[in-house]
Amino acid sequence: MGWLSRGIILVVGLVSLTLGAFFIWIPCFGYLAYSLWSATRKRKVYVHDGRKERGAPKARKSLFRKRYMVAGAFFALSLVAVAAGGTLAPWAFLSAGSLILISGIFNRGPSFSEVEEVPDSILLRRRWLPFSWVSLVEVKFGTRQMSKALSSVGAEVMMMVSSEKVSVYLPVSVRAFSASSAESRVAEKLGPVARMLSARGAYALPLESKEAAAKLDWSLRPVDVALEYGRDGVVSLNSTPFDVLVLAPSAHLLESAAAYVVAPSGRPGHYRVPARGKKLQSKPLLWEALEILSEKHAPENADALTDFLSSVSASRGESLGDRLESGGQTRAGKIVVGSVGSQQVELTRPQLRAIVRAYG
């Protein structure tokens, strides 16, 4: 039934409400409420490997206009209730319409996912939560077995896909009153993760604030992830049209997931960290999801930074003077540094401090 038919039903319901014909307006408003609810629950059917599954991935449409229509209906009900001599009903309908309208305004307002640079650090500060900080850590792979390295990471994983290559990042969130305290807490949280990754051929590289912010200068549009529908829910990851995928595990299970397509930022300089997405009712293994993804997406190739981090990790426990070799400083203020048996690389001072803290 289309919107015109629903509009007619709404008019009939309003008229019957003024006449006191409850046996007419109750079914009318009941049907309208059910149709609005069911519109958010519909799933398309798609075919994958010859089998039908529910939950075709699709970009989510904004409900902003529908929200105005629903709010208008409640305002109209409030006027009708006033005309009928009601006392509590007008205020109830007016409050419901106002809440729906305000929720739409908030969706267009400031976002708590926005972050801003913190100069000379590896931190990004939450724009509207001044004591909340994020550090974006890139995972450098010395192995092609992405699932082996990440399956036990125990932390939120953000994957950016480009030309069937995938870049993997770990958003490390902490709360602290100052930037120095936040960096210390990031190092504490990153240490066990870095050691776990290095034992499996992958290495953690904290990004400098400006570089991290540049990677988050985008506009994101959510895409449905069909992980819960059909016998092979995780297989749908290879047919989901995403540019960014966020996986949030709990132990070995995938607790929540979110997928996004990227568009050029309409507000340059407004950096956003992708949200985790909704919790999954049927939680697959993180390893299973990573195995499916690795069939189509390979990690970025190892480079000089990968070799440097590998050497720093392998020489853990030795004195810092024996592990690092200074190569001077660049005109941009970066430090040129090498480790035993690795090429020299360029790092900012905050990056080098974070690496030494994480790898001990």
Image (cartoon, rainbow, N blue to C red):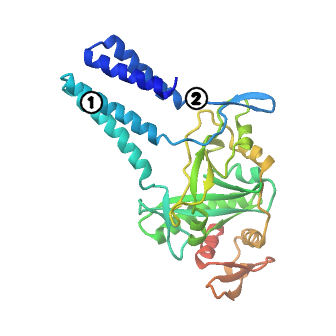
**Which secondary structure lies at badge 1?**
helix
332 displayed left or right of 344? left
Foreground: 98 or 326?
98
Check residue 102 in the rendering and tell me which mark sits there, or answer none: none
289 displayed left or right of 11? right
Can residue 208 be seen from the camera position used here?
A: no
- Tag 1 residue: 78
Can residue 121 be seen from the camera position used here?
A: yes
| Res. 102 image quadrant | top left
Amino acid type at image mark 2: Lys
Q: In this view, does 120 lie above or below 140?
A: below
**Which secondary structure lies at badge 2?**
loop
- Tag 2 residue: 42
Separation of residues labelled 2 and 1 (CA atoms): 30 Å
Q: In this view, does 157 lie above or below 278?
A: below
Measured from the top left, where is residue 184 in percent x and y? 52, 68
Measured from the top left, where is residue 227 in percent x and y? 66, 37
Measured from the top left, where is residue 231 in percent x and y? 72, 29
Amino acid type at image mark 1: Ser
Quarter placement of the C terminus: bottom right
Q: Residue at x 61, y 30 (%)?
A: 43
